[in-house]
Image (cartoon, grey):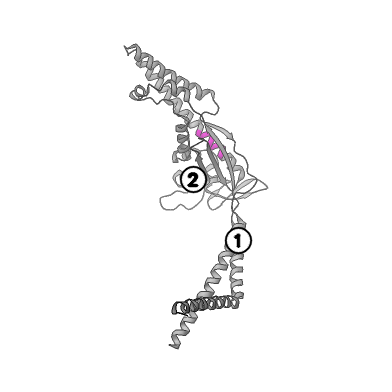
Amino acid sequence: MNSNDLSQENTATNDEIDLKELFSVLWKAKTLIIVITSFFALSSVLYALSLKNFYKSEAILSVAGESNALGSLSGMGGLASMVGINLPISSEGKGEIAVKTIQSRAFLKHLITFENVLPSIMASESYDLQSKKIQFDPEVYNENNGVWVREPGENKQSKPSYLEAYKAYLSQVSINKDEFTNLITISVEHISPIFAKEFLELIINEADELLRNKDLQESSAAIAFLNNEIPKSSLITMRDAISKLVESQLQKQMLSKINEEYILKVIEPPFIPEVKSKPMRAVICILGTLLGGILAIIWVIMRHYNSSSLKSDLNI
């Protein structure tokens, strides 16, 4: 037998001895491991039970397009840009505008003008399933008087500003646009399932209404400008082009006035959720127990080998 074979045999023997030693160390400390693991398990259960239930309401929206208008005006983009007029936007472009509008600070500033929106976002403490009402933190908001009573921080007031509420708004509202189907999925997660549904409805309706009013104002201004320009033009072709632009703006106004859902078409409406979306208490308890067991095993092994190393140094 050569030296390489002897070396491999010694390594295998040492590995076997080390594994037996490791198992023996863990077995001797099994009570300690069980105690530590049980502590983590109990702590994770208590932590999971202390968390509030959150409910998620969700809606699926399609985006209205104006492909016909785009086709008839495809050759007049240069003229429209010269006079400062926006041609009808495709459904893809409208979808992006709708998403960015809902995610904007200006839109939240508009939303918090509605009753109980700001307190529900910033001061909700719990939800009463029997009365189906939000319980507000009395140290932050006095529901009876409708007064904010919290102690303001630096450069802040008792009543949260829309800038301060924006972070909480983004944590509760989620919106995603599918690039292939052009569908928009939007959800609101809150401790109150009723508020989640009602707030989601408010977001959809107000976003659609703001976009409608914006288009109405722009088209009205464009029509007034173009009607003044028609008599000034001496070229028949230019007059015809301007007339077509006026026609496109009139079409935009007609669509915005006759359609109850202007840009955002509801496919799946908001609903009152019956089952909580989080926390996942079972997962928290399992992960907490596993973490406790792993940490207990690591601590026992480190303690054993540190103690063995210290004894070896003292003998030397």
Position of the C terminus, as image quadrant, is: bottom left
Residue lying furthest bottom: 315
Q: Position of residue 314 (x, y in %)?
A: 45, 87
For disc 1, the marked residue is 286
Instruction: Find numbered disc 1 in the image and state the secondary structure of the residue it sits on.
Output: helix
- Residue at position x 61%, y 71% from top? 34
Identify the residue shown where x is 57% and y is 75%.
Answer: 23
Q: Residue 275: which numbered mark, if any?
A: none
Residue 154 placed where, x, y %? 41, 53
Specify the principal SS of the magenta part.
helix
* Depth order, front residue of 161/298: 298
How packed is label 1: few (under 14 Cα within 10 Å), some, or many (20 or more)? Answer: some
User: Is residue 202 found inside the magenta-colored segment of the image?
Assistant: yes
Residue 29 appears left or right of 87: right
Q: Quadrant of residue 249?
A: top left
**Circle nearer the N terminus (2, 1):** 2
* Residue that numbered label 2 is attached to: 170
Above or below, comparing residue 241 to residue 123 in the picture: above
Q: Nearer the viewer, residue 165 or 97?
A: 97
Residue 44 percent location from the top left of the image: 59, 62
Where are the magenta residues, as a range?
A: 200-207
